[in-house]
């Protein structure tokens, strides 16, 4: 067989393949953090191209890295899995799971990506199973367990949060969340019973509309400069139903007219810009999770997991156990 690459290049890649993939995955996450939200207000083509390439590559690189780490754990039996180098690489697996969860600035590149939340759910199950397999194969000391288990839990929360946000932003779930609960009105059962009794007696029943006053929302912020922002948020709560193929009633139309009739054209366009920004956050970022009680609880628990992992690594693994015992793998510890 013709060898395309020199033996030295092949040997170098075999030694550094996982390290390169982990660093690449980290760099892609940084790119998504920096540029994922910029395309909301910057229309330059290069930002869209960079974001699109990073978004498509991030999941692929992290998945390939996890697969390569898992292959190292099963090549030569349990003894190979307990090798110091493999122990360190296995410690990267939970952090790759965190990478698969993605940053807060972007969860989907287009609206169609939200409809693929079931695919991400399947990926969550597969990648969590693969990471669990890696950790079980390399669980050798209490120190290592204390290092990887909190990061593994944080990775599950991070990846699950992304799947939850994609599901919530899908067209079907978004429509269901915007529909108001059924409200037949006070005394509906008594009214229906009276109506049936009158019909049973053979009497005629006439229905007439009762005029109902329209109460308009008034925004009176403590900070005058924030009035446009708060008005845009109120209008967003009304207009976002249009994104779910719902209609507005005359009460909503009256509120919108009342809040915009005394504004200049520049102020109205500014409100529309802010409303579109809110809608972008709902459809393409983790705003749904960030501004919910469940999201706050899960993120608080994830923060505790991150702190626990950092403390264990800095004061136990790095100083007392792994990196001093196996100085050859200092680079992996630093990475």
Image (spheres, helix red, strand yellow):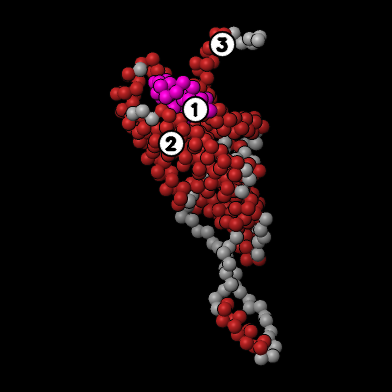
Q: How far apart are the two marked residues, 1 and 3, measured between alpha carbons?
A: 23 Å
Q: Residue at x 64, y 51 (%)?
A: 171
| Residue 49 location (% of width, % of height) | 65, 31
Quadrant hosting residue 109: top right
Q: Are discs 3 and 2 less than 8 Å apart at CB?
A: no
Q: Nearer the viewer, residue 301 or 218?
A: 301
Q: Nearer the viewer, mark 1 or mark 2?
A: 1
Camera-side residue of 3 and 288: 3
Give the alpha-carbon distance from disc 1 to disc 2, as whole Å. 15 Å
| Residue 190 placement (x, y as % from top left) | 56, 81
Q: Which residue is mark 1?
A: 70
At label 3, counting other C-alpha atoms closer than 10 Å, the crowd grade (few under 14, some 14-19, many 20 or more) is: few
- Quadrant for the C terminus in the image: top left
- Vertical relation: 279 (above or below) 134: below
Looking at the rendering, the stretch of residues picked out in magenta corresponds to 67-93
Q: Residue under circle 2?
A: 152
**At x 59% / y 44%, what residue is drawn?**
118
Of the numbered discs 3 and 2, the one sitting upstream in the chain is 3
Query: If you read the primary sequence from the N terminus, does the residue marked by circle 1 or circle 2 appear first?
Result: 1
State the quadrant of the N terminus.
top right
Tell me whether circle 1 and circle 2 mark residues in contact (CB < 8 Å): no
Where in the figure is residue 202, as x and y percent of width and height?
69, 90
Q: State yes or no: residue 76 in magenta.
A: yes
**Do callouts 1 and 3 mark residues in contact (Cβ within 8 Å)?**
no
Mark 3 lies on a secondary structure that is helix
Q: Position of residue 328 (x, y in %)?
A: 38, 15
Which secondary structure lies at badge 2?
A: helix
Q: How much space separates mark 3 and mark 2, taking CA atoms?
A: 34 Å
Label 3, on which residue? 9
Callout 1: SS: helix
Badge 1 or badge 3: first in the primary sequence: 3
């Amino acid at each position: 067989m013709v060898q395309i690459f020199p033996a030295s290049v092949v040997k170098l890649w075999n030694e550094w393949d996982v390290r390169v993939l982990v660093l690449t995955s980290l760099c892609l996450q940084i790119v998504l953090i920096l540029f994922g939200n910029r395309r909301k207000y910057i229309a330059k083509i290069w930002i869209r191209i960079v974001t699109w390439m990073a978004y498509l590559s991030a999941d692929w690189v992290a998945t390939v890295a996890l697969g390569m780490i898992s292959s190292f754990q099963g090549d030569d039996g349990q003894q190979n899995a307990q090798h110091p180098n493999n122990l360190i690489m296995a410690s990267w697996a939970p952090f790759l799971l965190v990478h698969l969860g993605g940053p807060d600035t972007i969860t989907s590149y287009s609206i169609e990506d939200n409809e693929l939340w079931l695919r991400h759910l399947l990926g969550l199950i597969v990648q969590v199973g693969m990471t669990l397999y890696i950790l079980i194969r390399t669980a050798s000391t209490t120190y290592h367990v204390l290092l990887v288990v909190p990061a593994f839990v944080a990775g599950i929360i991070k990846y699950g949060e992304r799947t939850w946000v994609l599901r919530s932003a899908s067209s079907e779930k978004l429509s269901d969340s915007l529909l108001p609960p059924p409200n037949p009105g006070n005394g509906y059962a008594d009214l229906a019973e009276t109506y049936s009794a009158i019909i049973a007696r053979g009497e005629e029943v006439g229905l007439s509309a009762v005029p109902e006053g329209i109460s308009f929302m008034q925004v009176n912020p403590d900070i005058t400069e924030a009035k446009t922002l708060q008005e845009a948020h109120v209008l967003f709560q009304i207009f976002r139903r249009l994104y779910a193929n719902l209609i507005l009633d005359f009460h909503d139309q009256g509120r919108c007219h009342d809040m915009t009739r005394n504004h200049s054209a520049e102020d109205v366009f500014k409100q529309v810009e802010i409303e579109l920004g809110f809608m972008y956050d709902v459809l393409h970022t983790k705003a749904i999770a960030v501004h919910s009680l469940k999201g706050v609880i899960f993120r608080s628990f994830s923060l505790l997991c991150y702190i626990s992992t950092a403390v264990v690594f800095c004061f136990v693994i790095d100083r007392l156990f792994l990196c001093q015992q196996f100085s050859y793998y200092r680079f992996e510890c630093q990475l």
